[in-house]
Amino acid sequence: MTNAGTAASAQIRADALQRPPPIRNRDLPLLSFRAVSKKFTDGTEAIADVSFETHAGTIVSIVGPSGCGKSTLLRIASGLSAASAGEVSLDRTSVGYVFQDATLLPWRTVRRNVELFAELRGVQKAERQRLCREAIALVGLEGFENHYPNALSGGMRMRASIARSLTMKPRAFLFDEPFGALDEISRQRLNEELLRVFLVERFGGLLVTHSVYEAVYLSSRVLVMSARPGRIIADIPVPFPYPRAPGLRFEAAFAALAGTVSEILQKASE
Ligand SMILES: Nc1ncnc2c1ncn2[C@@H]1O[C@H](COP(=O)(O)OP(=O)(O)OP(=O)(O)O)[C@@H](O)[C@H]1O
Ligand SMILES: [Mg+2]
């Protein structure tokens, strides 16, 4: 990244952070699950009686044992999969979905990948380019617009994937272990980037992660699921105000809360 690019991107972030947009309909649930269950046709019961709500301007994390139905829950939220029972409510015209794998098209440059969703929606070229520039600046990928995905690191591919969804200005953002494949330092760095973007865009996020520390660092609430069929067995508020400094991870209150979540998760996995 060029120094000029870095400076410009930092300025955009600083400006946006000083003027966060108002959160629309803060009190209305953005996403709601009521007694949702999912049984696959082969008889596998993935989730059972799941109920929760999320709101705009909050990030809710989901942790749970492997195979407990977290991705299934996210796929149901996104509309990619149907619930077998219960009710789901979400305005699907305004949802961003980030998968564990960045799912970029290898024959398109970063710019053309980030423009993809706007292009598919028929957004005019000039507007598409503006949205793309803004999203690339927000995730700190300036200078890499003309790179192909195979010339990017895993973390940069994930940034491009997040930028691609940001061009849709989603009110709800669903993340399925977006940083699971990254080393600890890259993951922490991207956690900070994600919080920065969150404070600018004020979307409502639902994040599946295997990392208790990531869940506590990013979220307003952590939901813990039981082993399959996944049920929500704990809904833990995270009291630390935003913006959160990286040093929060070393504070005693943070360690205590992460310990509480880990303990519940451990019991759920037994
Ligand atoms: N299409 C399907 N047909 C049948 N069973 C499925 C299908 N998709 C997922 N499952 C099963 O549903 C259960 C939940 O899967 P899911 O992928 O939601 O778990 P997960 O919590 O995301 O796991 P991980 O943490 O490993 O990503 C698993 O037992 C899985 O084998
Ligand atoms: Mg999964």
Image (cartoon, grey):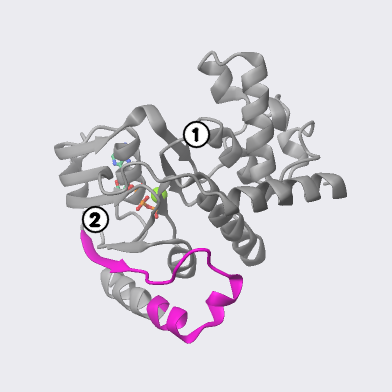
Q: Is residue 225 visible?
A: yes
Left or right, 19 with reference to 183: left
Residue 115 image position (x, y, % from top left)? 63, 25
> Residue reaching furthest bottom?
252
Label 2 C-beta lies within 8 Å of the nearest ligand 1 atom: yes
Rendered position, 125 above or below 110: above
**Image point (45%, 78%), residue name:** 254
Q: Toward the viewer: 81 or 32?
A: 32
Q: Nearer the viewer, residue 83 or 31?
A: 31
User: x, y (%) of residue 50?
Assistant: 19, 51
* Magenta-tinted stretch: 232-258
Rendering coords of residue 268 (x, y %): 27, 69
Q: Is residue 246 a member of the stretch shown in magenta?
A: yes
Q: Amino acid at mark 2?
A: Gly
Q: Quadrant of residue 131?
A: top right
Q: Amino acid at mark 1?
A: Lys
Q: Residues within 10 Å of mark 1 (few under 14, many from 20)?
A: some
Q: Nearer the viewer, residue 216 or 212?
A: 216
SS at mark 1 in the image? loop
163 is within the stretch colored magenta? no
Which residue does the numbered mark 2 point to in the structure image?
230
Quarter of the picture containing the C terminus is: bottom left
Residue 105 seen in the current view:
no
* Relative height, residue 175 to residue 266 (above, below): above
Marks 2 and 1 sit apart, C-alpha to C-alpha, by 31 Å
Q: In this rendering, would 203 be left or right of 127?
A: left
- Residue 205's label in the rendered image is none
Rendered image: mark on residue 169? 1
Q: Position of residue 260 (x, y in %)?
A: 34, 79
Q: Residue at x 40, y 31 (%)?
A: 94
**Residue 91 as seen in the image, left or right of residue 232:** right
